[in-house]
Image (cartoon, rainbow, N blue to C red):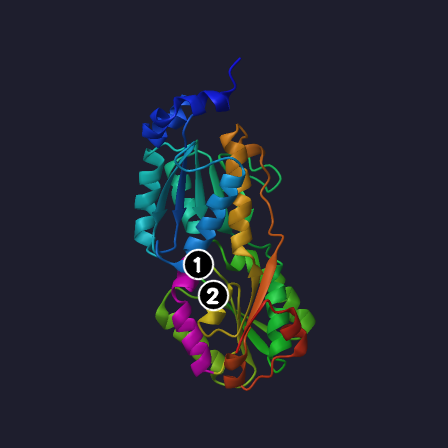
Amino acid sequence: MIKRREFIAGLGGAVAAWPLAARAQQGERMRRVGVLTLFDENDPVGKARLSGFTQQLAELGWTEGRNLRMDVRSAADNVDRIQMFAKELVGLQPDVILANTTPVTAALQRETRTIPVVFVNVADPVGNGFVAGLPRPGGNITGFITEESSLAGKWLELLTEIAPAVKRAAIMFNPDNGGGGSYYLPPFEAAARVLKVEPISAPVHSDAEIQTVMTSLGREPGGGLVVIPDGTFTFLHRAQIILLAARNSVPAVYRASVLIRDGGLLSYGPDFADLFRRAASYVDRILRGAKPAELPVQLPTKFEMAVNVKTAKALGLTVPQSILLRADEVIE
């Protein structure tokens, strides 16, 4: 019997002349993976996360051009493009789609109830109707959530740790994007009772409403802010929120470290790069025959903290040693 490696070697240059897809068809079937993100295709953070995903897939045996084709669509923070790309990807009939953020997952769910979808950067998949439950999703969607609702209490705790003078704190969210209030408000209010801080619910739908909340918080000393993340509104308005927090001397806590590099005070949240790498394991299992309905939704296992010392000084705050020692990133 001729070994496969010896046989291929014997073919010599003939193999090199075959197109990659043709070679895949000669051996194993070419599989198709769709990817839909909110990132701009040139965004370095988005590129790094997607690179981690593809590298992990390669380690699991899936190499683009050999046995895998990836169709990537980037909505570039444009909500109107999400549904267009969702329809386009579903039309390509991929074996599985990677969905980044709640709005993206919702758009794909509207387009298909059969093609497997693996999500990352979704906070409340049960509340949004993506899955029946975390242990057994029950449909064509599963994935990796960014945080449990209890993290809202942790954000408030960190806010009072870096800004002990905070006596009233607003939780800012857009109720049209992923629930926000109903998911995060109860643990936020519970933490506020323990910390003896007045909780303020601050739903926002527009620039004007963001302005109103920030002006109100800064009107007298003791105001603070926790910004609830979502894939579109608060993230797209992050520059305005950071600017108004500075202008009104309002200390604020966020989820993603990218906001701290942009001038925000403090962030604590999941390691998103790790979630993308872990998502590759579910894509791999689905490509090998697993059903999304039977793959439990998983929680983050790695978290990261970032603090901007320059922003703290501008707010008249001294970053406590307890935060400096825990921070993964300290921006001077």
First in residue order: circle 2 vs circle 1: 1
Residue 89 position within the rendered picture, expressed as x and y whole percent measured from the top left: 34, 39
Assess whether mark 1 and mark 2 are in contact (beta carbons under 8 angstroms): yes
Name which residue type carries label 1: Val
Q: Which circle marks residue 90 in the picture? A: none
Look at the picture and state if 154 lies above or below 107: below
Q: Which residue occupies 58% across, 43% down?
A: 297
Name which residue type carries label 2: Val
Q: CA distance from mark 2 to mark 1?
A: 9 Å
Total labels drawn: 2
Q: Which residue occupies 48% across, 34% down?
A: 140
Look at the picture and state if 135 lies above or below 193: above
Q: Would you name the residue on which mark 2 appears?
A: 258
Secondary element at image label 2: helix
Give the residues in magenta: 231-248
Residue 262 lies in what quarter of the image?
bottom left
Q: Which residue occupies 39% across, 66% down?
A: 237
Residue 215 position within the rendered picture, expressed as x and y whole percent measured from the top left: 43, 80
Decide whether residue 66 is among the magenta residues. no
Residue 21 position within the rendered picture, expressed as x and y whole percent measured from the top left: 35, 29
Residue 242 position within the rendered picture, expressed as x and y whole percent measured from the top left: 44, 74
Q: Would you name the residue on which mark 1 appears?
A: 45
Q: Residues within 10 Å of mark 1 (few under 14, many from 20)?
A: some
